[in-house]
């Protein structure tokens, strides 16, 4: 096996590390050429280098054994996990990218995922590069707690506003119900990935007509939407049918609120980062095309709410990412601001937005391009935060 | 040079033309159509066809594949099954679905005769009629000409019948196979009428895109007045392998696709899961198959922004080698029992592999023959690209519908990253026996249905 670049003398390693740092942003960069290889067999853990300069380190972990394996870099106490890759099936190679500060560490393979595995000493020398580690784990945990408060607050408000909306709906006050519809949904849309993570609730609460398979019963927001903004004559529901829909949505919303309020409900930094990206995916898939609110055309409320939610998710990770990838932070700050400015041209959640059908084709294209311009760097947020 | 052993004796217009029973209100110039079809093409490309259109006692002999390179390959139009199903999958596709525009059964039969004869000729690499540069100077050329000088390129032409052929126009309702269902609406389907349905279809596959397009163009020309293209789809790269000798290609998501496909060599599986039998209900479909066509758009920009972890977890395989996440190499059987640290399976239960695997569907398999497509960009500047899913099955009710239902409801890849925009189902009848005579009174694909 050729000696990996990282094990070369220090003079060469600066250049190599720059290349590695770049590789996070340039998918085609051949990071694996310079990676440390780890061969995890049934009874051995062969690491191609035992000493590397500090900074970004890439491990290519190959499982040559018969069982599922794991690879860890541990602090010298053998307990604290610096970085890890789990669930590597036999024959599979997985890449692990980590920021490692100078110091003494242990590498560990755990074939079969049990026991102490096979450990060896691993030394990281000081390259002089800034390494973003330190209190990062703590900061990420704090970010999770902070975001959880936001989720709970939004769902609580959703529940309150949903109840008010449903009261108008079941009372037959359709004008009032139509006026409350978009504003209540804002609180769903802001934390949509969390709500969607409950796979049983989401289809009952937020399914669009096209999402249904033959024989499915349609309930939730969009069922009511079609009743309030009927595409033609003949979409009336009886009072009893309305009551059933309202009871169901109220009960599902209460269930959602109780689940996110549960003590054991937590959100990891990865989930926050991925959630931010997914919120923009939601914009790109449903809102920018006018498919989400196909009867009420209130897509821009949802659009703004998705962007709000992504912005909050980014906000709780901001300080961590500012250390690991300042250029990304700069780009995200400006892209969020551009998109929000563009949305503001069409209204606001407080004062109401233009209907989707009022937008010109050029305006829609302009919004779509701004969404893409934000989505692309936002998709790198998770890796920058948890690297 | 001309065809090796094909005597330079055309089917004369007398043999072919003039005899079709045309409806009195809509007279057909079958003589003209016949002459377009049946006069000898001027050239045959060197080495293209050894067998060619040997005319013996009014019948075509089977074309034979030569041992020359891939694009020189010519497949046999004749056989127990139509070509283009277990044929090693070619790289390019032009697919067209047609509406029948006549109410005359005789005209439909006449169309199928014209198509069958033309298909047999096109598959040898020959031009139609007097060719692209021959014939009457005052008349448009019989052949459009863009395949002039190109070899057969492995062209196969496969004909199918949609549910509309069995409506009340042609008196065929009682012969509609139970298997030829109206496909249900699957969760998340966003079907566009422009890519859905059809009374007839033609699948033209070749190793040269120009040859495939030439086939559809000329066959649709032969159909004017009787049938018109309802929708069509180009495919620029195969996403399946139908023989063991072929590598597994990658789809537009960047993953190997069709690793577990039924292949021609798996004759037991092909017999069990692809070919219809007499006992299946409609005798005329024995030796045929059912073709599911689905235009599946991939939300490319969104997929491209998802992490490698998310992509592999959605598919259930690694992106690099295509190995199942339970371990091994591409062709290692997925092991859905292998669990990771938190006890959940390494191949997630909501991954594509887990939900589509035969073990989840009573062993049901499909012979997939799909293609990557891109039709430019949509109004928002996003790639209008994806997978044109084609699969041959013996019974769509058992092999396609339950699998698609599971994918549409639960498969992360399908739910989050795919949108099906077109859908159709066709009954693909058996092939024509070698030695069959073609022409205006001759044999044609699907003749057992009308006979």
Image: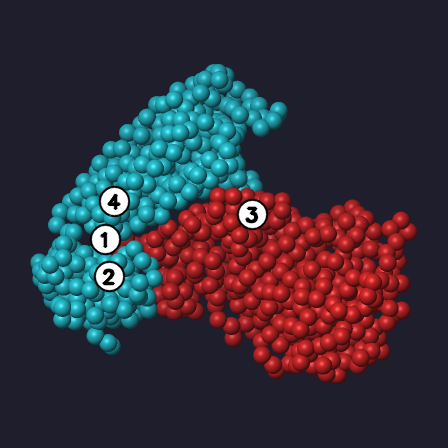
Chain colours: A cyan, B red
Residue A258 in the image: state x and y as whole percent. Answer: 31, 32
Of badges 2 and 1, nearer the viewer stands 2
Mark 1 in CB contact with mark 3 (< 8 angstroms): no
> How many angstroms separate mark 1 from mark 3 (CA)?
38 Å
Query: In the picture provided, is A363 more to the left or to the right than B35?
Result: left
Instruction: Give the mark nearer the N terminus: 2 vs 1.
Output: 2
Tag 3: Cα neighbours inside 10 Å, few (<14), some, or many (≥20)?
Answer: some
Q: Is residue B47 above or below residue B314?
A: below
What residue appears at the point 35 percent right and 27 percent down from the top-left corner?
A: A158
Chain letter for mark 2: A
Residue A347 in the image: state x and y as whole percent. Answer: 40, 26
What residue appears at the point 22 percent right and 67 percent down from the top-left corner?
A: A36
> How many angstroms separate mark 3 from mark 2 (CA)?
41 Å
Instruction: Give the mark nearer the N terminus: 2 vs 4.
Output: 2
SS for callout 2: helix
What residue appears at the point 38 percent right and 55 percent down from the top-left corner?
A: B311
Q: Is residue B90 above or below residue B449?
A: below
Which residue was labeled with disc 2?
A20
**Residue A329: which numbered mark, if any?**
4
Residue A106 shows up from this direction: no
Residue B238 in the image: state x and y as whole percent. Answer: 54, 64
> How many angstroms separate mark 2 from mark 4 (CA)?
19 Å
Which residue was labeled with disc 1?
A387
Which residue was labeled with disc 3?
B421
SS for callout 1: loop
Tag 1: Cα neighbours inside 10 Å, few (<14), some, or many (≥20)?
Answer: some
Mark 2 in CB contact with mark 4 (< 8 angstroms): no
Marks 4, 3 in one chain: no
Instruction: Give the mark nearer the N terminus: 1 vs 4.
Output: 4
């Amino acid at each position: 096996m050729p000696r990996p670049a990282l094990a070369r003398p220090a003079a060469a390693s600066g250049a190599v590390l720059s290349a590695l740092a770049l590789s996070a942003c340039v998918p085609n960069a051949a990071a694996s050429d310079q990676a440390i290889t780890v061969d995890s067999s049934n009874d051995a853990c062969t690491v191609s280098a035992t000493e590397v300069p500090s900074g970004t380190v890439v491990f290519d972990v190959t499982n040559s054994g018969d069982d599922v394996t794991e690879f860890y870099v541990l602090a010298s106490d053998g307990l604290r996990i610096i970085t890890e890759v789990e669930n590597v099936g036999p024959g599979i190679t997985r890449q692990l990218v980590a920021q490692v500060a100078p110091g003494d560490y242990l590498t560990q393979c755990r074939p079969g995922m049990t026991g102490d595995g096979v450990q060896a000493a691993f030394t990281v020398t000081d390259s002089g590069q800034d390494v973003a580690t330190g209190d990062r784990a703590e900061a990420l945990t704090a970010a999770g707690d902070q975001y959880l408060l936001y989720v709970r607050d939004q769902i609580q408000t959703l529940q309150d506003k949903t109840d008010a909306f449903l009261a108008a709906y079941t009372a037959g006050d359709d004008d009032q119900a139509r006026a409350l519809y978009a504003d209540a949904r804002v609180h769903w849309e802001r934390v949509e990935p969390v709500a969607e993570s409950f796979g049983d609730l989401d289809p009952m609460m937020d399914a669009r007509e096209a999402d249904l398979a033959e024989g499915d019963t349609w309930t939730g927001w969009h069922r009511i939407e079609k009743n309030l903004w009927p595409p033609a004559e003949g979409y009336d529901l009886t009072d009893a049918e309305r009551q059933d829909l309202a009871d169901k949505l109220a009960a599902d919303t209460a269930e959602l609120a109780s689940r996110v309020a549960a003590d054991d409900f937590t959100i990891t930094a990865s989930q926050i980062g991925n959630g931010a990206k997914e919120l923009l995916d939601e914009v790109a898939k449903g809102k920018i095309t006018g498919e989400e609110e196909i009867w009420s055309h209130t897509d821009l409320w949802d659009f703004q709410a998705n962007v709000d939610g992504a912005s909050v998710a980014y906000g709780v990770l901001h300080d961590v990412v500012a250390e690991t990838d300042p250029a990304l932070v700069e780009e995200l700050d400006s892209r969020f601001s551009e998109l929000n400015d563009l949305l503001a041209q069409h209204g606001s959640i407080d004062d109401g937005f233009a209907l989707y059908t009022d937008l010109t084709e050029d305006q829609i294209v302009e919004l779509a391009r701004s969404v893409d311009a934000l989505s692309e760097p936002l998709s790198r947020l998770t890796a920058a935060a948890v690297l | 040079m001309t065809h090796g052993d094909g005597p330079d004796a055309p089917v004369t217009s007398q043999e072919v033309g003039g005899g079709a029973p045309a409806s009195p209100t809509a007279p057909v110039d079958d003589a003209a159509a016949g002459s377009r079809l049946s006069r000898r093409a001027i050239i045959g490309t060197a080495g293209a066809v050894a067998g060619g259109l040997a005319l013996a006692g009014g019948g075509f002999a089977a074309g034979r594949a030569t041992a020359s390179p891939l694009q020189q390959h010519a497949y046999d139009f004749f056989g127990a099954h139509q070509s283009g199903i277990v044929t090693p999958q070619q790289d390019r596709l032009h697919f067209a679905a047609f509406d029948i525009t006549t109410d005359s059964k005789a005209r439909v039969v006449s169309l199928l005769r014209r198509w069958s004869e033309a298909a047999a000729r096109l598959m040898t690499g020959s031009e139609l009629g007097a060719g692209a540069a021959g014939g009457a100077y005052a008349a448009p050329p019989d052949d459009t000409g863009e395949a002039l000088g190109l070899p057969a390129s492995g062209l196969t032409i496969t004909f199918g019948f949609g549910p509309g052929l069995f409506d009340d126009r042609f008196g065929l309702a009682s012969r509609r196979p139970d298997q030829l269902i109206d496909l249900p609406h699957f969760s998340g389907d966003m079907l566009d009428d422009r890519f859905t349905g059809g009374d007839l279809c033609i699948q033209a596959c070749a190793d040269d895109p120009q040859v495939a397009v030439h086939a559809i163009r000329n066959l649709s020309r032969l159909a004017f007045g009787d049938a018109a293209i309802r929708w069509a789809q180009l495919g620029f790269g195969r996403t399946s392998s139908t023989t063991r000798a072929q590598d597994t290609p990658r789809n537009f998501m960047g993953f190997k696709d069709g690793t577990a496909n039924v292949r021609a060599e798996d004759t037991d599986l092909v017999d069990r899961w692809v070919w219809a039998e007499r006992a299946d209900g409609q005798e005329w479909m024995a030796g045929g198959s059912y073709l599911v066509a689905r235009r599946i758009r991939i939300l490319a920009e969104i997929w491209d922004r998802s992490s490698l972890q998310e992509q592999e977890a959605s598919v259930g395989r690694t992106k690099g080698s295509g190995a199942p996440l339970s371990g091994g190499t591409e062709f290692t059987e997925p092991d859905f029992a292998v669990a990771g640290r938190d006890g959940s399976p390494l191949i997630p239960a909501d991954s594509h592999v887990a939900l589509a695997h035969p073990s989840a569907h009573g062993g049901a398999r499909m012979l997939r023959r799909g293609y990557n497509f891109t039709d430019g960009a949509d109004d928002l500047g996003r790639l209008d690209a994806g997978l044109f899913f084609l699969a041959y099955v013996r019974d769509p009710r058992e092999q396609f519908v339950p699998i698609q239902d599971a994918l549409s409801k639960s498969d992360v890849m399908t739910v989050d990253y795919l949108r099906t925009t077109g859908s159709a189902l066709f009954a693909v009848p058996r092939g024509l026996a070698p030695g069959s005579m073609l022409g205006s009174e001759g044999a044609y694909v699907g003749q057992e249905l009308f006979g």
